[in-house]
Amino acid sequence: MRVFSPRLDELIESLRRLPGVGAKSAQRMALHLLQRDRDGARRLAAALQEAADTVGRCRDCGLLTEAERCGLCASSERDRSRLCVVESSADVFALEQATDYAGLYFVLGGALSPLDGLGPEELGLDRLEQRLEAGEVAEIILATSPTTEGEATAHYLQGLAAEHGVRTTRIAHGVPMGGALEQVDQGTLSHAFMGRRAYEG
């Protein structure tokens, strides 16, 4: 016997498409919006519709934006000789909030994963190669995830950069601030140990 109406079921299933949202969380959200915040539900629906219709990808870097070029690529204050390669727009937001990086970005939209049908073409690496050929980029900063796919992507990008004589650096992976060594997983600890550098106090 069906407990919820078909439209409520559809809303719950739609909310479950969001990452990290399970059946119970989606149900809680749907019931909250319909029982306690109808105005919020309408505002959310309108914002989602507007974003879905108008937000695309920057023609230069792939960052989500409603303009042809994002604000970062259009800015005359960014260092155009440095290009940080990331997997998603979320990575750009995280780096902008946490660092003083002043260069440009290239958003892949994922990592190389042949099993998922994500090859160099799907990640727009032909556009990246065109930028390297133009000669403006002097350094590529690899900021892909420390996963198997992320490491394979970083390795591929390093080879691409080497072909064009572009210096490649990789963001450090290691022990988080405030973390105790015995609580860190083996892979992270191994990366941290291999990536050690001179201590300057």
Image (cartoon, grey):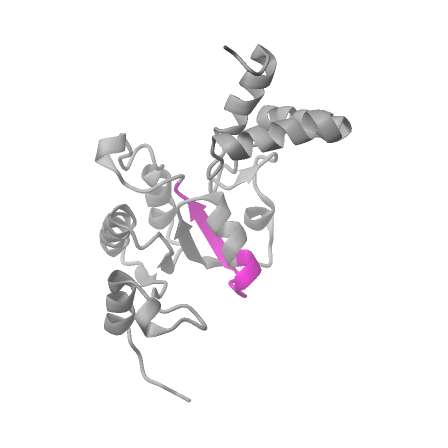
- Asked which quadrant contains residue 185, the reply is bottom left
Q: Is residue 189 visible?
A: yes
x then y, percent, for residue 168: 31, 61
x then y, percent, for residue 137: 40, 56
Q: Residue at x 61, y 34 (%)?
A: 66
x then y, percent, for residue 123: 34, 37
Residue 154 as seen in the image, left or right of residue 21: left
Q: Residue at x 35, y 52 (%)?
A: 144
Foreground of the two, 183 or 65? 183
Residue 20 as seen in the image, left or right of residue 142: right
Magenta stretch holds residue 186? no
x then y, percent, for residue 56: 54, 31
Foreground of the two, 104 or 14? 14
Magenta stretch holds residue 98? yes
- For this orientation, the residue located farthest to the front is 1
Quarter of the figure with the C terminus: bottom left
Residue 57 as seen in the image, left or right of residue 137: right
Residue 184 versus residue 65 in the image, above or below: below
Q: How many marks?
A: 0
Q: Residue at x 57, y 21 (%)?
A: 11
Q: Residue at x 32, y 66 (%)?
A: 184
- For this orientation, the residue located farthest to the bottom is 201
Instruction: State which region is magenta.
Output: 96-108
